[in-house]
Image (cartoon, rainbow, N blue to C red):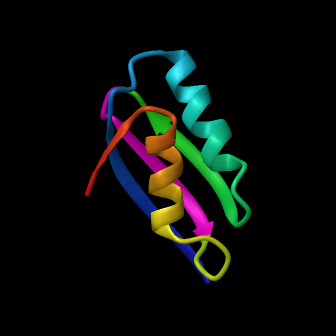
Amino acid sequence: MAEKTTLNVSGMTCGHCVKAVENSVGALEGVENVKVNLESNSVEIDYQADTVNLTQITDTIEDQGYDVQQ
């Protein structure tokens, strides 16, 4: 089942941060699209909930050194 969520993520400040989050989350099986917005400190994700869950996505972002507020 396709899901779309937006997470508030702190600690992202530059293009490197954008790529780190987009590449790591985008590499998860079931993630279809990742869009980082530095101005709003948010990450918009389209994913297949039957393949990947929100905890896995959040853990992946936090593994890159950023904080996810839920």
The image shows residue 21 at horizontal and vertical percentages of 55, 36
Residue displayed at 54% across by 42% down: 35
Q: Give the prevailing secondary structure in the magenta stretch.
A: strand
Image side of residue 58 versus residue 41, left or right: right
Residue displayed at 45% across by 55% down: 58
Magenta span contains residue 44: yes
Residue displayed at 64% across by 41% down: 24
Magenta-highlighted residues: 39-47
The image shows residue 41 at horizontal and vertical percentages of 33, 34
The image shows residue 22 at horizontal and vertical percentages of 61, 38
Q: Nearer the viewer, residue 58 or 34?
A: 58
Image side of residue 68 versus residue 19, left or right: left
Q: Nearer the viewer, residue 20 or 1?
A: 20
For this orientation, the residue located farthest to the left is: 70
Q: Nearer the viewer, residue 6 or 17?
A: 17
Image side of residue 6 versus residue 60, left or right: left
Residue displayed at 53% across by 71% down: 53
In which quarter of the view is residue 12 placed?
top left
